[in-house]
Amino acid sequence: MPNDDGIHDEYFIEPLRLIDAADAVGVALAEVADAKTGRCPYPPAMLDMPGHPEVLDGFTSEELEEATAFLCRLGFLVHRPTR
């Protein structure tokens, strides 16, 4: 599927699947966020964590990456790389 530049992306996620993955990301982040700072791990990386939120089990890391980017574009998440 072409992006805004007319270039075809290698990965495409169906719109409803994207919404489901974004919902799962939100639930997972609420589960693992630090209560004092609000900081949390990058959602796709949570799949590799022992005891990761079960809500993520039905998704691939690519789907979670797309969902995270989607939530960032909507302003629901702010990606701040660790220093």
Image (tube, rainbow, N blue to C red):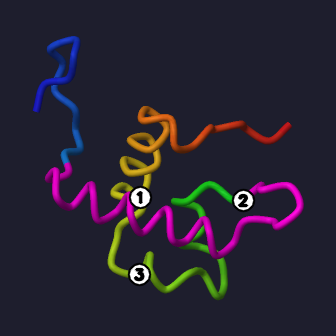
Give x and y (percent) for residue 68. Answer: 46, 48
The residue to which callout 3 is attached is: 57
Q: Picture quarter containing residue 3?
A: top left
Quarter occupied by the C terminus: top right
Give the quarter of the figure containing the N terminus.
top left
What residue is shown with label 1?
64
Residue 6 vertical position relative to residue 79 in the rendered view, above or below: above
What stretch of residues is rendered in magenta? 13-40
Q: Quadrant of residue 58?
A: bottom left
* SS of the residue under disc 1: helix
Q: Position of residue 28 (x, y in %)?
A: 55, 71
Foreground mark, 2 or 3, reads 2
In this rendering, the answer to whether 15 lies above or below 9 is below
Tell me if mark 2 has few (under 14), some (14-19) or many (20+) residues whose alpha carbon lies within 10 angstroms of its own: some
Q: Pointer 2: what residue?
A: 40
Query: Which amino acid, mark 3?
Result: Asp
Distance from disc 2 to disc 1, alpha carbons, whole Å, reads 15 Å
Q: Say which residue appears at 51% left-offset and 71% top-offset.
A: 27
